[in-house]
Amino acid sequence: MNLENTQIQMRKGILEYCILQIVSRGEVYASDMLEELTSARIMVVEGTLYPLLTRLRKAGLVDYKWVESSAGPPRKYYTLTEKGKAFIQQLDQTWKELVESTNLIIKKNSKKSSSSKKQS
């Protein structure tokens, strides 16, 4: 197995949740999302982000509005819908459960490793 591919798949698995978290803070422009995701080391390109935003919009989780820009063409700003707010609350609970479960497994592995080192 390729480590890099596994890492990429793990990041892709939480991409939608991260995007919804960013949008939940208020109106946000797609390039600002890209910048935040990149700075958080969740590498994503426009070709991935825009189709995902379209899918989220079609699902009724996000909406957008066009805002005139003094520096060029109008910009599309995304916001969370009421349905999106309810959806992200459920995802927040799922995330907490996943983190807790993963930490339990990791801690068991750590305890096992440290006890086997003590026996050596």
Image (cartoon, rainbow, N blue to C red):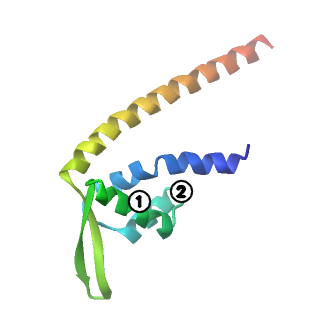
On screen, residue 108 versus residue 99, left or right, reads right
Location of mark 2 (residue): 41
Query: Which-is-in-front pick, marks 2 and 1?
Result: 1
* Crowdedness near tag 1: few (<14), some (14–19) or many (≥20) residues, C-alpha within 10 Å: some
* Quadrant in which the N terminus is drawn: top right
Residue 31 coordinates in the image, percent (x, y):
40, 71
Residue 21 coordinates in the image, percent (x, y):
34, 51
Give me the residue at 24% from left, 60% from top: 26
| Marks 2 and 1 in Cβ contact (< 8 Å) | no
Give me the residue at 23% from left, 43% from top: 86
The one of 117 and 59 positioned closer to us in this rendering: 59
For residue 27, above or below residue 40: below
For residue 56, above or below residue 29: above
Q: Residue furthest front?
A: 58
Query: How many numbered tags mark residues here?
Result: 2
Element class at badge 1: helix
Give me the residue at 38% from left, 55% from top: 19
Q: Which amino acid type is shown beneath numbered disc 1?
A: Leu
Q: Which amino acid type is shown beneath numbered disc 2?
A: Arg
Residue 112 coordinates in the image, percent (x, y):
66, 17
The one of 11 and 104 positioned closer to us in this rendering: 11
On screen, residue 82 versus residue 109, left or right, reads left
Element class at badge 2: loop
* Quadrant in which the C terminus is drawn: top right
On screen, residue 17 versus residue 116, left or right, reads left
Dot 2 or dot 1: first in sequence order is 2
Location of mark 1 (residue): 52
Q: Residue furthest left?
A: 82
